Amino acid sequence: MSEARTGQIGRIGLIGQIVLCAGVAWGSSTQDMRVEGSASFLEGKFSGSGLNDLGELVTGHEATRTSAVEDAAYMMCYATHREQLYFGAGYPAALIVYDGQAAKRMSSRFGSDFAVSALASDGRSLYAATLPSATIYKVTERGETSVFIDFSTGAVTPNYVWSLAAHKNQLYAALGGHFPSVYKIDLKTAKKELLHKADGKAKNITALLVGDDAIYFGDDLGRVYRQATAGGAGARATVLYSFSDAEIKALAMFNGGLAVAVNNRRFVPPPPMAPGGPKEEPRPPGEGGGEEGEMGLGADLKKAIEAMAETVGEKLKSPAPPPPAPAKPESPAAQPPSTLPPYQDPFGKGEGNLFWMSLDGSRVHKLWYSQSSIALSLWPEGSGVWVATSNPGRLYRITAQGSERLYYESASKDLSVICPSGKKLIAAASNPAAVLELEPSRRGEYTTKAFDAGFPARLGQPEAYGAGRDQTEVWIRSGATSEIDSGWTDFELLSGAPTTTGRFFQAKLRLKSPDGAIRRLRLPYRVQNLYPKLINLSAEVVRSQDGAPDGRDIRFQWDVTNLDNDQLQYQLSYQPPGSKKFIPIYDPSTQPKNVKSVNVPSEPYPDGTYRFKLEVSDKPSNGAGDALAHEQEFPLILLDRTPPSVDVKPEGDRVQWRATDAHSRVSRAEYRVDGGAWETADPDDRLFDSMEETGRIDLKGRAVTVVDVRCYDERENVRIQSLILK
């Protein structure tokens, strides 16, 4: 298929129209704003549009329903319970239920914890894990909570519950922090069984997947484990594959194997609980203090946690309020929440990856990679995997062959959860928190980043290439600042005639057909022509460059401000003494270009005082009708190559001298007697300040035969006159 311009906008040439903007000249060189390829498109914003694996802009998904979650910073997990979706929220810990119409905060209370980090349902009850207390609660239909099991140790650094899964009357929990491990808990008796204790430097079991025959889990060293469920308590976990120093964020069954989300950016948990948290329980066998008690999430994180703990400690030093009414020991929901330290964003930038792995770990290959976004949630569906990312919150679909397509970009910073609800796709967003219903879009929009033309610009005919070009509109807005504010114009449809914009402009593509695919947008523009300006002009008479001992040149030097970097040319002119007309020195074919210094021989110009003028023009880069020029005069130039006339005559015991110059002041005088050394001869008024000076040389008491007098003018022209005394 041949590449053609969008059918919405006809071809309109710029020639002959570019000078119609009243009083404004425009540069002649046309430049292009280009958006093509995945990297370029990803710099903009998507709404109902996305990208396919060919780097083409296509229609995607849109949020048909958005339910904001107030008083929550981020969403961390989900579970389907009795045909409703439940989400775990953070800062403070909260439980959100979504009934298909709106997201509502349940009345559930989780003590002073910061987030509900994991959820699971066995069909009868809902279980919610919180951090940083590592407590698992049982939640009733009315939102009432009771402690089901408590993993906290009472150490300075508590445990965290990162993932829960209910399977065949068993609840599986992945923990991290003080005792990174995997536990199995009997749902009837609440008896827990340790299945795996992390070794080495791993401090968190971060992902968990339970199947009929085995459980799979991953840690924050990039290791993926498999542990058979049929082997009972004696079964041991084996490492299927290690992705080096990374974090296994999520696991899902896909295409006969595992889909594995691997990030090099770890989750940043909230700070530890303040003193007076849950009481200490006996430590599992093999657990000690010292270094093992550190979380191991890096020095920066450790410092941040210590700083936040100190903040909490300072608050605790304040006078305590009256104690609350006694509450039942088994009801942490009755405990008032503690004062929260400043919010710390748990997600952020990093490199995200999606791998496929066979169930025995013998085959591994990469399906997807992002240099700036981390994968937060996976949901396999049919022949592909939905991947929700952070910073910005985007939704990708990756096929088993590694083909990727971007379907949605959220207004929130992170898409932290992706899950199904019937035939709908549901996403939970963070920063700000919201629940979104995502459905295929019938039309899409794409907005480029703000583009800096450098100067006010004029836009020509846009060109949109691709299968959907006939069903694509291009809209434009502009402003004078890089930040889009109230001073920017509204979006207007580009429909033919060239449009004048500010220095910054932004394009919006509207895809009117779900079958469209735009692979490139090219928007030609021409910046406003700006005046060149001459500054710092100077001129002086110097020795000739040709080396002639008596030759003199006039050296002209200057600077120029040329903000639009046009090619420049110069015209030097002079005004003879007594004339009112400037005469060009160069003809058009020899005008100097792009220089800041010129030497002109002085021989053709008779002695006298001259005015020289320089004109700069950007005509080489602009048409004759659009070129701009600026002129400036140099300081006056005195040309004087004739020495002063000198007259010497006797006057009693003295010799009188007189020096006269036609064009410049007499600058100094000297004399010598009978060929001796030269001595200074002062004028009568002791000051060389005019073109005629007289003076006297005292010879009283000296036998003199010959007196030589020499006088200089300002141009160092010199004449010697001798007087013979009898």
Image (cartoon, grey):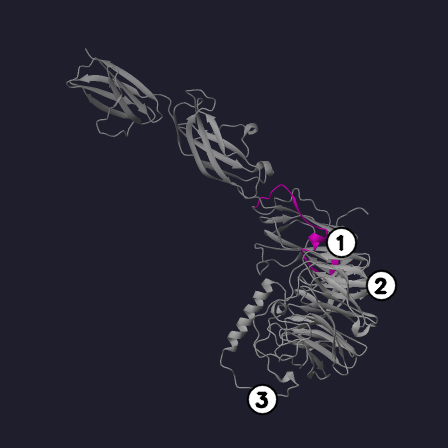
Q: Which residues are magenta?
A: 24-51
Q: Is residue 36 magenta?
A: yes
- The residue to which callout 3 is attached is 325
Q: Is the C-beta separation of discs 1 and 2 under 8 Å?
A: no
Residue type at tag 1: Glu
Q: CA distance from mark 2 to mark 3?
A: 56 Å
Q: Amino acid at mark 3?
A: Ala
As drawn, the residue found furthest toward the front would be: 286
Instruction: Name the front one of labels 1 and 3.
Output: 3
- Return the x and y of residue 476 as percentages of the image width and height: 66, 55
Side of 257 relative to 296 (left or right): right
Q: Which marked residue is nearer to the observer: mark 1 or mark 2?
A: 2
Residue 124: which quarter of the image?
Answer: bottom right
In which image quadrant can residue 445 be found?
A: bottom right
Q: Which residue is mark 1?
A: 56
Label 1 – label 2 distance at C-alpha: 30 Å
